[in-house]
Amino acid sequence: MVADDEAALPPGAPGTDLLSIHESIAGVLATQGDWRRAYHHLKSAFDLARAGSLRDTLTSSYNRRYLDQWLHGPALDHRGPPGMAIALVDLDLFKEVNDTFGHLVGDRVLREVADLLQQGLPPEAFCARYGGEEFALVLPDVDAARAVRIADTARVRVARHPWARIRPGLAVTISVGLAHENRAEPGRARETAEPERQLRRADALLYMAKRAGRNKVAYRDNESSRMIPRSVNSAESAGA
């Protein structure tokens, strides 16, 4: 009979096998009549499976399912007074990366961009793979000015990353569409279509950033209600 849970785990077992390990241990314990510990391992397996279902398998960032659950869940109702921003991020000319350097390099670029986008985010913010070469940054409890700074810092971080270390001649930039909305006034019900509306605004701004020359952040200035693409300095342009 297994003396304890830790003894049942093979030494050096990789984290990716934890789900099957918990399931196997639960089966052994169940045949021995140790239902309490069997339940404990089954619950651990369930928690791992659920967590895995909310992660993108390539980049390990959150996936579209997690994004949709968050945007339509109770977390949105508790965002802070400054409001919330959603940034849609698209890798510029990513098809050319795949065509020139191959899909294995393209996959590595996606993983590294996901890591770069997650750096420096506020505690409650997160990055999710929106689909293909698109990512979404969800920034709760930030005002518009801070959201712009976060998005543009991410843009610069990607542009300045030493991509040529992967393959000589490789350069990667991103375009960003940023939509910020203030929190609803107290007592006013949140419209059910608000997340979709904010995503549509971010998507429209993303296309504006693309049309403005790529490697830019496009956002709406609340005072002038104008679309303003961020400028690109010469140093970044040379590296892009």
Image (cartoon, rainbow, N blue to C red):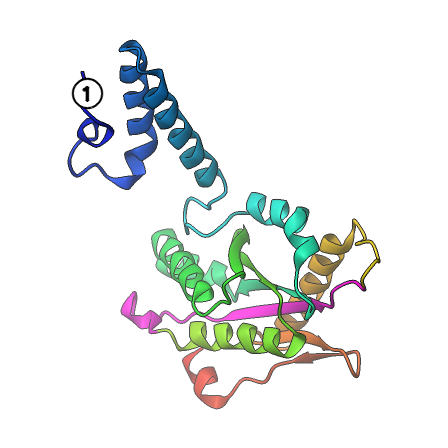
User: In the rendered structure, which segment of residues is drawn in magenta?
Assistant: 162-185
Reading the image, the residue beneath label 1 is 2
Give the total number of marks visible in the rendering: 1
Q: At label 1, which amino acid type do we have? A: Val
Is residue 37 at least partly visible in the picture? yes
Say whether residue 88 is left or right of residue 111: right
The location of residue 39, given as percent across then percent down, is 39, 22
Q: In which quarter of the image is the C terminus?
A: bottom left
Q: Quadrant of residue 215?
A: bottom right
Between 79 and 117, the one nearer to me in the picture? 79
Asked if residue 177 is among those painted magenta in the image, a careful observer would answer yes
The location of residue 108, given as percent across then percent down, is 36, 57
Between 38 and 146, the one nearer to me in the picture? 38
- For label 1, the SS is loop
**In the image, what residue occupies the spot 68% across and 61% down?**
203
Q: Quadrant of the N terminus?
A: top left
The location of residue 162, given as percent across then percent down, is 33, 74
